[in-house]
Amino acid sequence: MTMMIITVFLTVIAAVLAILVKNSQTGSGIFAPPEISGSRDVFPSAKVVNLTGASGPESIAFDPAGEGPYVGVSDGRILKWRGEPLGWSDFAHTSSNRQECVRPFAPELEHVCGRPLGLRFDKKTGDLYIADAYFGLLVVGPAGGLAKPLVTEAEGQPFRFTNDLDIDEQEDVIYFTDTSARFQRRQFLAAVLNVDKTGRFIKYDRSSKKATVLLQGLAFANGVALSKDRSFVLVVETTTCKILRLWLSGPNAGTHQVFAELPGFPDNIRRNSNGEFWVALHSKKGLFAKLSLTQTWFRDLVLRLPISPQRLHSLFTGGIPHATAIKLSESGKVLEVLEDKEGKTLRFISEVEEKDGKLWIGSVLVPFLGVYDL
């Protein structure tokens, strides 16, 4: 009887929360995504490049010849855009076991098919380096095909959720993140809601083939970006809505501090040719998210609600799919905020790559890329 009462109570709470979130979809409810001062709602005018038979272009990369973009998608492939007449073509994949990998979106098969997240080209060699959520750090040559694993553990601890990377070609090292030691990629929302702090930031030396942990105890270690002068590297900590700066040289070498605090949950971060940084926010931080992450009683309640992961995600993001990109200076100052406040064209963005006067915009959840002309 007690369990039945608890179940009924949780069901009622879930229904009330759902109603409150639905009311927030007008943009004015208590759980609605908050406004950001000075932002411009310009992304509804973005164009979209649809993916055929694929979904979730998390990361975006252009090869040394400027061709692409290349994107990693949910079924474990890396696709190459060849322009309007030719469309998308298969370039590479991270798993040799492709028999079951036929559905565009199948989270239950990610551990079989792979889930390529961060992508970066070595500008000298044309090799593509891949952070795959399940298979660690990999590389594939300019001709594509099956990627080769480079490293799957650091200091005796296997990677559980490899996420993003950047390359220092001069030092011959790769910086990358392992998001969590407890949760895998398909459990990303659980990792955030549980305020998991087992993420790591790691350096891989290509000559010695050694992986060294530089930072640990991170709350959802995510995007990575090296500064233009290579004096520091930035690491996204999604759950805390912060970006950390680790100094690589100079008087502060080896130390780190908060580089920026953001009004939402950052995913990947990418440097433009001026040395500034574009940060993609998966969503803004509304009241439901704040309560979930700061009030233990509320978080415990939320984690027990009898609702689907999709409904929980909707609650957490404020009920309105939206898109927010923030440009930061080399010192962490906010320079620009671009949005699609109502998700008319873009939503739940994961990366913003600036190239030739355009922003190429990825998302871990939708079957297309956004392109916004600056």
Image (cartoon, rainbow, N blue to C red):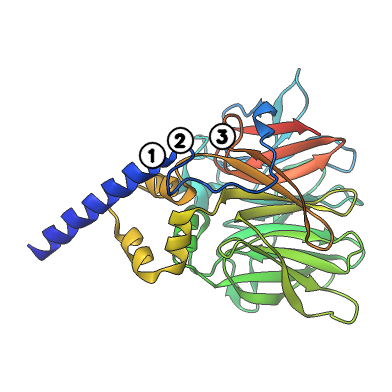
The type of residue carrying mark 1 is: Asn
Residue 276 visible in the shown view: yes
Residue beneath disc 3:
343
Q: What residue did someone put label 1 on?
A: 23
- Verify CB contact (< 8 Å) between mark 2 and mark 3: no
Residue 214 position in % (x across, y down): 72, 76
SS state under label 3: loop
Name the secondary structure under disc 1: helix
Q: Quadrant of the N terminus?
A: bottom left
* Picture disc at residue 14: none
Quadrant where the C terminus is found in the figure: top right
Q: Residue at x 65, y 40 (%)?
A: 339
Report x, y in % for residue 26: 45, 35
Marker disc for residue 26 = 2
Q: Amino acid at mark 2?
A: Thr
Q: Amino acid at mark 3?
A: Gly
Tell me whether circle 1 and circle 3 mark residues in contact (CB < 8 Å).
no
Q: Position of residue 153 (x, y in %)?
A: 63, 70
Q: Is residue 185 left or right of residue 190?
A: right
Q: Residues within 10 Å of mark 2 (few under 14, many from 20)?
A: few
